Structures are given as C-alpha cells and as structure tokens.
Image (cartoon, coloured by chain):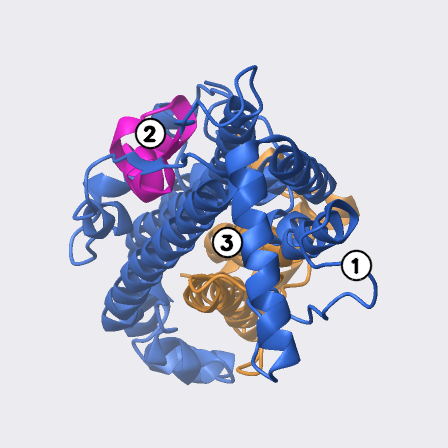
Amino acid sequence: MQGWQFAAELSQLRIVGRVDLPALSSTFAAMNRAVAGTAAGETAAFQAPGGGTAASQAAWAALRDDFQNVLGTTSLNILDAGVTVEHVVDAYLATDEAARTSLEAAWANGQTPSLQEAEEKFAQNPPPTVVIKNDDGA
Amino acid sequence: MAFTHHSPAELQQLGEKIRDKAVQVTMDQAASYAAAQQAANNDATRSDTGQLPQVQGYPTPAQGRPDDEDNLRAYVGQAYAELPAMFAVFGLPNPDDSRPMLDALYSVAATVEVDLQLTSRDNKIAAPSAVSPISSTASVGEVVDLIGGHMKEWTGDAALAFELYLKNNVRAAALHREIALSLALSLEAQLEINRRINTDIWEIGQKTYKALDGLDAWCPGANASKSVALLTISGAIAAVIFAGATAGAGGAAFAAAVGVEGLQSLATTLSNTGPLQSKKVDIGGLTVPPIITGMQNAMTELTKSIDAQQQELAGGLTKFTQDVHANWNRILVPGPREMNDVRNADGASLKASDTFRVR
C-alpha cells in the first residue's frame, strides 16, 4: 500500500498517537493528581488522641503512594506509547512522498481528519504533569 | 443520629466544668468531704515523712490543718487539676473536614467506571458528594475501543502487542477502581473511629458530670449516684462495613466487597471485624472519688478500644497492600517490549519487518 491510500491508514494511526493516547494519558494523570491531593488532609484525618499519629496512617499512606505512582507511571507509559506511534507514522512518511503530501494536506490548518464524535471532546492540550512519590515520601 | 463534633476547646471546657463540680460537691457533700479530709491528712503525713503523696506535689500546708476548709479546698483543687487536660487530650480535628479526601477518591473510582452505588449520600457517616468522573477526562474503555477502530487495518508483532497492552490497561483499570474504593473505605473507617472517639469522650464527660450532680442533692450523704456511659468506639469499623450502611460508605463497602479476580477487597478483609458493639461503663458511687475513678476507667476503656480498632484497620490495610503487590504486573501494566523495538526504527526497516504494518 502506498500513496493516498497509505496516507489514510497513517492518518488513523496519527489520531491514535496524537489524540487518543494523550487523552488516555491525561485521564490517568488527572487521577494521579486527585490521589496526590489527598495528602493535604492526611495529618488531620489520621491524628490520634494526644497529638500522635493513628496506627493505620502508615499503611494507608503507603497504599495511597503506591496507587498514586501506578496512575502516574501508567500516564507516562501511555504518553510514551503515543510518541512511539507518532514515530512510526513519521518513519513511514519519510519513505513515501505521495503519502506524506496527502497526509499533510489532510492535517493542514489544525484539522484532524476522521475524528470520531467522542474524540472531538478530548482535550488537545498536553497531558498535565503527574506527581510521583519517591520511596522517602517526597 | 447525626454527628456533632466537639472541638478540643469544648472538651477542655467540659473538663473544667467537671473539675469545678468535683471540687464543689466534695466541699458540699458530707461523705465526700470526710473522705477528702482523710485523704488530705494522709497525704500530709506522706509529705512530712518523705513519701510520695497521692496528689502529686502536694505539700503540707504552712498554716492551719490539712483538713480545715481552706486547705482542704486547695487540696481537692490540686487533686482534680488534671481533669480538663484529660478531656482535651482526646480532641481531634473535625472528621467531616476530611470530606474532600473522600470525594477525590470516589471521583477517581467513578472516572474508571461510573457506579450507581455511589450516587446517594447521608450525613451520619461521610458520604461521597463528588461521584462523577473527574471533569474533562476520557473514559479508559471508550478510548481503547476508539483506538481499536483506528488500528483495525494495522498488524504485526508490535501493533498487536500494543493493542494487547491497551486491553490489559482496561483490565487494570478495574483493579485501580478497587484500590480507589478500598482507600476510600479505609478512610471512612478512620474518620468513623475519630467521630466515635469524639462522641464517646463527650459521653464520658456528660455522664461524669451527671453522676457528680447526683451527689449534689438535698440530703447530704444520703444518695448514691449512678450513671452509665455507653461507648460506641468498638463498632466503628463494623458501622462502615455493615451496620452504618449509609449511602456513601455502605455503597463503597458493597462495591469494594464485590472485588475483582485475584484481589480480595479490603471490605472483605475487614468484614471479619466484630459485630457492631456498644460497651457500658459504670460511672457512679457514694462519693466523688469513685465517680472520678469510674470516669478514668471509661477513658482507659476508650483508649484500649481505639488501639484495637486502629490495629484492625492497619492489619486490613497491610493485607490488602500485600495483595496489591502480589498483583503488581496486572495493576501497573508494563509497556510492550515490541514497541521498544520500533521506537527508533526507520521506515525502510518497518517496511522490511513484520512489526508494525498495514494488513
């Protein structure tokens, strides 16, 4: 397959790498940050009588940190997969001038061809940053 | 019954009220007065002979007898000086102020999968108010379906491994939801423990005051005062898991109890907790000292029960976390190795190989 027909398939792949995977990454990043935000209230929620810390706090915080990191790492992994998918598109375009011309024309002026209705709602901004906890809790 | 939070300052004030009442009743009630006189005389003897007095730091008065009215009032005041601090030490931040933490966890669970179990609320036990997905987020399952559509003409080792990776992430999302709900559920339990600490220490104070007030009656020395404090702390976790069954916590418990394959839910682990229990502790007596002793016993019982609930919650969380680690590769899906192979491949290599190509 080559030329405009190949461009049509590459365009589908570019949507995956440029629209869908960043949107998916963004979802996991949003969850990561929501979980990270629970740290703000932790001291008050787990205060024990006498001003100490409740025995359950350490276990809860450890699980929360693990979960936060899972969501953050998943977000980054998916974003990274998107970069790889876009690389595949670009690598193929470098071998097929007709496909390149056809694809770039279709994507010119900020257009994204063949988007599904649901995809039009996906934010086109870069995914928000994630918050990863180190082993020392930082 | 809706929870009413008593601030640390209110607990301090309650302790001061009980202290003042204990001194007043001691000075007014004949039997308590006589008991205090004897205690003051004994402590004076201890102090004079280098022994440790029962009222710490009590010195034999420089003027007058230990058991005359003014010296006795000072002795009793010193004996009960610590009462306000004994109540204030149980002061905790208002558990309802932690609602944003719960809302965040429930919204994460709903982002993974909207769940009708999490839609209603109640004010007895904290219930989620933010049960809708985090705004502007795309549904994991929906995006993966869309990707499947875009890639239907693509095949090869890397392309297939990539699609499998995405499907595994959809499966992982079910586990993520389970973890979010278990974190929410354990936080609900922690906050319920704190609510019951607050309720129970207030109950102990009220019943102590009532018992003291019962001695402060018309016929000096004729009346024994009876009062019973009902401590609810031991049922805190059970209330969240079962009996509370209030909309939010109950819904979370139910949803989390369903669990997912390979990961026993925290709700299931904690369901081995004892039944909803209330414990009665007697606070009463013929004079002030046994009433104060009853109050201290109730505080000791409360402290022991707090420790037991905390150990149970910590144990459940630890076990659940071990299960999470045992399922780690299903929860944090590793990126496909085949995708690494195409990361830097040029077009010619891609065309020549079978890794990522159009059918």
Residue at the spot of label 1: B64
Residues tagged by mark 1 and mark 2 found on one chain of the structure: yes
Figure colour of chain B: blue
Which one is nearer the viewer's eye here, B174 or A111? B174
The secondary element bearing badge 2 is classed as: helix
Quarter of image, res B247: top left
Whether the magenta-drawn stretch holds residue B214 is answered as no
Residue at the spot of label 3: A16
Residue at the spot of label 2: B250
The outermost residue toward the front is: B64
Number of the front mark, 1 or 3: 1
The span shown in magenta is B228-254
For disc 1, the chain is B
Number of the front mark, 1 or 2: 1
Residue depicted at 57% across the width and 77% down the height: B52
Percent coordinates x, y for residue B90 in the rendering = 57, 50
Of labels 1 and 2, earlier in sequence is 1
Q: In the rendered image, what is the letter of the chain coloured orange?
A: A
Whether the magenta-drawn stretch holds residue B250 is answered as yes
> How many residues crowd mark 2 within 10 Å: few (<14), some (14–19), many (20+)?
many
